[in-house]
Image (cartoon, grey):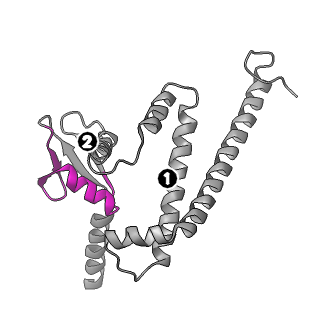
Amino acid sequence: MTARRGKTAESAEAEETSALRVLKKYPNRRLYDTHTSSYITLADVKKMVLDGQAFEVRDAKTAEDLTRSILLQIILEEETGGVPMFSTSSLEQIIRFYGHAMQGVMGDYLERNVKTFGELQSRFAEQSQGLAFSPELWTQFMGAQSPMMQNLMGGYVEQSKSLLSQMQEQMKEQMEKAGALFPGMPGFPPKK
């Protein structure tokens, strides 16, 4: 019976560490971490993201999910300080996709590409495991590895092109299916 209690305590502890962490956002713009029973900052939320901690942000009054809003605030802070990731033209292009018929496709395309790039980064980190570099040494190392990085990025670009081609093919197939359902309707290809 003792082992059973121990197992229950262990499973409760495992549940607690893998559980979704809930943050409450109050009208005064403060974030409250229900897990630690304390107020936290956006920097703390950023650390949770970097650590891979699962969480969600809820409005304290309405319980509305504000997670995306908080993540966008973190991105905005990162973009306005230091070295931005997005150029002005890339931000303009992203804005142009909002409200466009391709908005959903673009979101899926970006998500897949970011995931693929993260996987490439993980593989590179695994291959260079044990090498403790400072940020300055990493910059020098990456500069010296230009041909290798070009090959790595070239593979990534090819994979990205392939992904876009697959998405275009899926859209074409969906349009053909829709054309079969609505023969003669403008904008749909004729039924084969």
Q: What crowding class fits label 1: few (fewer than 14 Cα within 10 Å), some (14-19), or many (20 or more)?
A: few
Q: In which quarter of the image is residue 75?
A: top left
Q: Mark 1 points at which residue?
A: 114
Q: Name the residue under label 2.
A: 58
Q: Residue at x 75, y 15 (%)?
A: 185
Q: Which residue is drawn at 25% across and 74% down?
A: 9
Q: Which range of residues does the magenta coloring cover?
A: 29-55
Q: Is residue 92 left or right of residue 62?
A: right
Q: Rounded to the nearest whole Å, what is the CA distance between mark 1 and mark 2?
A: 26 Å
User: Which of 183/119 is in front?
Assistant: 119
Type of the residue with mark 2: Arg
User: In the rendered image, which quarter contains the N terminus?
Assistant: bottom left
**Label 1 or label 2, whichever comes before in sequence order:** 2
Q: Which residue is drawn at 29% across and 84% down?
A: 3
Q: What crowding class fits label 2: few (fewer than 14 Cα within 10 Å), some (14-19), or many (20 or more)?
A: some
User: In the rendered image, which quarter contains the C terminus?
Assistant: top right
